[in-house]
Image (cartoon, rainbow, N blue to C red):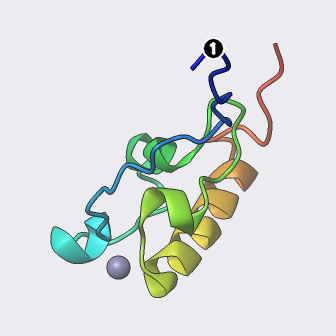
Amino acid sequence: MAITAKKKGKRKLVQQKRFCSFCANNLDIDYKDFKKLKNFLTERGKVIPRRISGNCAAHQRTLTVAIKRARFIALLPFTVSK
Ligand SMILES: [Zn+2]
């Protein structure tokens, strides 16, 4: 065929096995442990949502509280400006 159908911007959904890293490794969330909390922030300093990070609801909740505490005592940035 001369005319080929234009592919729509469909990205193949990569099926990744998601799991809550805190449940799986039996870790507890500490607001002073900013190195661990940094893994759940974007490069602009925003909290990565649960649908991306794969955390369970309970751990995501404690994580956001911990991140907010860490921000308040200046361990983590509120925003990262470029
Ligand atoms: Zn969990």
Image quadrant assignment for residue 74: top right
Instruction: Please provide percent x and percent y for residue 10.
Output: 60, 42
Q: Is residue 20 above or below residue 9?
A: below
- Horizontal placement of 5 versus 80: left or right? left
Instruction: Please provide percent x and percent y for residue 29.
Output: 39, 68
Q: Residue furthest left?
A: 25
- Tag 1: residue type? Ala
Q: Using a 10 Å C-alpha cutoff, classify the residue at mark 1 as few (fewer than 14 neighbours), some (14 to 19) or many (20 or more).
A: few
Tell me the quadrant of the picture where the N terminus can be found: top right
Q: Is residue 55 above or below residue 2?
A: below
Q: Residue at x 46, y 58 (%)?
A: 53
- Horizontal placement of 51 versus 73: left or right? left
Which residue is at the front of the view, 7 or 57? 7
Q: Is residue 46 above or below residue 58?
A: above
Q: Residue at x 68, y 28 (%)?
A: 6
Q: Residue at x 28, y 64 (%)?
A: 21
Tell me the quadrant of the picture where the C terminus can be found: top right
Instruction: Please provide percent x and percent y for residue 13.
Output: 45, 51
Does the rendering let one see residue 26?
no
Give the image quadrant in which the ligand numbered 1 is located: bottom left
